[in-house]
Image (cartoon, rainbow, N blue to C red):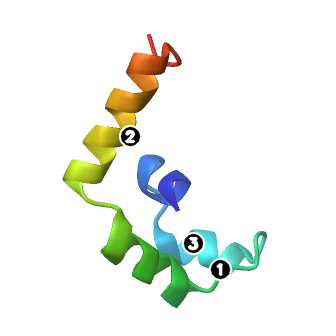
Amino acid sequence: MLYALGTNIGIKRVADGGRYGEAEAALRTTRYLFVNRDNLRKAIATLVNLGLVA
């Protein structure tokens, strides 16, 4: 899901690929519930604090 957003491919194309077996509706629900500005900032801060991102 983050791949779809980060590469600007879009959720529909990632779901259409069927590579991982996720339905478009499931990906959209996940994005709606969990992917927001605050959660992304927290995730980035965690990675930086662990030294995984320069």
The reply to whether discs 1 and 2 touch (Cβ–Cβ < 8 Å) is no
Mark whose residue sits in front, 3 or 2: 2
Which quadrant does the C terminus fall into?
Answer: top left
**34 horizontally vs 26: left or right:** left
- Seen from this angle, which residue lies furthest left? 38
Q: Is residue 38 left or right of residue 52?
A: left
What residue is pinned by disc 3?
Answer: 13
Distance from Cα at disc 1 to Cα at disc 3? 5 Å
Structural crowding at the residue carrying mark 3, measured as other residues with C-alpha within 10 Å and reported as few (<14), some (14–19) or many (≥20): few
Q: Are marks 1 and 3 in contact (CB under 8 Å)?
A: yes
Specify the label residue 43 is tagged with.
2
Mark 1 and mark 2 lie on one chain; the one further toward the N terminus is 1
**Mark 1 or 2: the one toward you:** 2
Residue 51 picture location, percent across and down: 49, 13
Residue flagged by tag 1: what amino acid is it? Asp
Residue 52 or 11: which is nearer the viewer? 52
The residue tagged 1 is: 16
Spatial CA span between label 1 and label 2:
27 Å
Label 2 secondary element: helix
Q: Is residue 30 left or right of residue 3?
A: left
Image quadrant in which you'd find residue 31:
bottom left
Q: Is residue 43 above or below residue 11?
A: above
**Residue at (39% x, 18% y) in the render:** 49
The percent coordinates of residue 39 (x first, y second) are 29, 51
Q: Tell me the residue at 48%/19% (across/down).
A: 50
Could you say which is closer to the camera, residue 22 or residue 12? Answer: 22
Judged from the image, the secondary structure of the residue bearing numbered disc 1 is helix
Quick one: label 3 or label 2, which is nearer the N terminus?
A: 3
Q: Is residue 17 above or below residue 46?
A: below
Q: Residue 39, which numbered label? A: none
Label 3: element kind: helix
